[in-house]
Each structure stands twice: as structure tokens, then as C-alpha cells.
Amino acid sequence: MHEQSAANDSLDYERIGRFIYSFLRICGSVDVLTETAALGNMPRDLAVRASNVAQKFDYILKNSASVPEGELESTLSEVTEVQTEIDKWRFRDSGR
């Protein structure tokens, strides 16, 4: 029984570790994502999405054992979309 619990814990650490690595590789850091969302000149809908995905990251870290794999995947998909939109917005805003 104890061995099964240890194996499950190990799988959860690996699963959440992969999620954290992927999330941060996409957006750099949650702080940067949150700070970018707080900029007054960012489109409101993009700021809301960035803030929501940062909050979702925190939620997943706090509740990692109970978060299904599908939710991790959808969060990574969302942060990818958000970061792509942020990059487009920065490019347009820089006048390039």
C-alpha cells in the first residue's frame, strides 16, 4: 500500500514538474505575465486572459494532485495562445 502511494506521488511530481517547466518556458514567468497584464495600454480582453491564466497556474500548483491531465493540457494551450497574442501586441505597439 505504501509503495503504491509513493509511486503515485512520484508520478504527480513528474506530471506537475513537466507542466511547470512547459508553462514557464512558454511565458517566461508568472510574474512577467501578471505584470504585463497590469499594463494600462494592453487590450482589456488580452489583459484579462493573461491574468486568468496566471491565476490558473497558481490554482494548479496549490491543487496539483486533484487536477486532471486535461486541465493541465488546456492551461498550456491557453498560455500559448495568450503569449502569442502578447507577442503580437508588443510587435504592433513597438511600431515595427
Image (cartoon, rainbow, N blue to C red):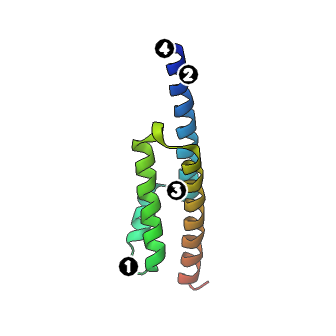
Amino acid type indicated by mark 1: Gly
Label 2 Cα crowd, 10 Å radius (few <14 / some 14-19 / many 20+) = few
Q: Position of residue 75 (x, y in %)?
A: 54, 55
User: Does label 4 or label 2 sit earlier along the sequence?
Assistant: 4
User: Does label 3 or label 4 sit earlier along the sequence?
Assistant: 4
Closest to the observer, 29 or 2 = 2
Label 1 Cα crowd, 10 Å radius (few <14 / some 14-19 / many 20+) = few
Q: Quadrant of the C terminus?
A: bottom right
Q: Quadrant of residue 74?
A: bottom right
Q: Position of residue 62 (x, y in %)?
A: 39, 43
Q: Which mark is residue 40?
A: 1
Q: CA distance from mark 3 to mark 1?
A: 20 Å
Label 3 Cα crowd, 10 Å radius (few <14 / some 14-19 / many 20+) = few
Secondary structure at numbered mark 3: loop
Q: Nearer the viewer, mark 3 or mark 4?
A: 4
Circles 2 and 1, Cβ within 8 Å, touching? The answer is: no
Circles 3 and 1, Cβ within 8 Å, touching? The answer is: no
